[in-house]
Image (cartoon, rainbow, N blue to C red):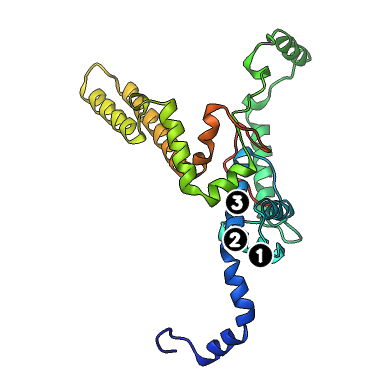
Amino acid sequence: MQEYNVGSSTIYDIKAQKGKLLPFFASYESNKAVEQCCSVYFSLKRLEGAPISGPMLVEKAKDFYKQMQLSEPCAFSDGWLSCFELCHGIRKLPVSGEHKLADHKAAEKYCEFFRNLIEEFEGFKVKVRKNTLAQILEMVKDTPSSHPINKLHEMIHTVTDTEIIENVLNPETSKNTDRDSEEEDFSEEDKITLRKASSVFDTIIKFAERQPCYTAQEVMQLHVLRSTFMQKRQKTINQADIRDLFKKAASGCGTGSVQIQPNLPHLLHLQ
């Protein structure tokens, strides 16, 4: 008791619950694998931009449980869902009820201020012409049908449930397979690391700052370009774990039920 800093009552409780604790720890690894599959699935759906609710995630967990052919008992209840959300940082957005979260008095005051501003400012008094809508429709008619805005985005790749399970259960094998595939597709000369690209940006900026032929505006544009690169670099690093799942699809193989599209939101919460 002194070694583990626990009381005698705790030890007695553990002995009394021995019959329940042993099966629980025996099935812990299997349940953890199902949880990891659900986490990867949720991340993929978040990148896809598809809405996903708590009951949908519970049903997907049951589906993974069947596909993995597990025999250990696991109750996918509301308690399991709450623990899953807590462990993976998924927040539920509560619906605003009787208590308003915003300061409605300040909002009404601002609306009144903005209304008076529009009435006083002459620049906002624009006469609406009747032929404006007709001109807009005429411009749309002249737009060629082959314009990029009329083209549907092609599907980049798909990730199957089997690939998710394989990546969770055998991560080392999956990494070795992806590494071999990547080495076949790209040579060492074609690979440029993010660190090397960042170093090149710094070198170019230092060179431009020391040369009189570059104006201050041109140097500022280089700084803006470097800032954009650093933001994308940080985003790439944050998504490195998920991108490992997509390397197989780079060769154009495999189909599945999870579809990844190019336009992706930054964040999705459980509804």
Disc nearer the start of the sequence (3/2): 2
Q: In which quarter of the image is the N terminus?
A: bottom left
Q: What element carries label 1?
A: loop
Image x and y of residue 21, in percent? 60, 77
Label 3, secondary structure: give it: helix
Question: Which disc is residue 123 wearing?
Answer: none
The residue mark sitting in front, 3 or 1, is 1
Mark 2, secondary structure of its residue: helix
Residue visible at 67% across and 49% down in the picture: 107
Q: What residue type is labelled 1?
A: Glu
- What x and y, as percent, mark residue 15? 58, 86
Residue 29 sits in which quadrant?
bottom right
The span from disc 1 to disc 2 (Cα, nearest Å) is 8 Å
Going by the numbered disc 3, the residue's amino acid type is: Cys
72 versus 251 height, above or below: below
The residue tagged 2 is 30
User: Pointer 1: what residue?
Assistant: 72
Q: How many labels does the image show?
A: 3
The residue that disc 3 covers is: 37
Q: For the residue carrying disc 3, how many other residues have a C-alpha within 10 Å: few (<14), some (14-19), or many (20+)?
A: many
Do tag 1 and tag 2 residues touch (Cβ < 8 Å)? yes
Front position in the image: 269 or 142: 269
Q: In this view, does 170 lie to the left or right of 4?
A: right
Tell me how far mark 3 sits from mark 1, CA to CA. Answer: 16 Å
Work out whether mark 3 precedes mark 1 in sequence or the reverse, and give the earlier one. Answer: 3
Given residues 59 and 209, the one toward you in this image is 59
The amino acid beneath tag 2 is Ser
Which quarter of the figure has residue 91?
A: bottom right
Is residue 43 among the parts visible in the rendering? Answer: no
Residue in view at x 49 percent, y 40 percent: 244
Residue 95's x, y, as percent?
72, 55
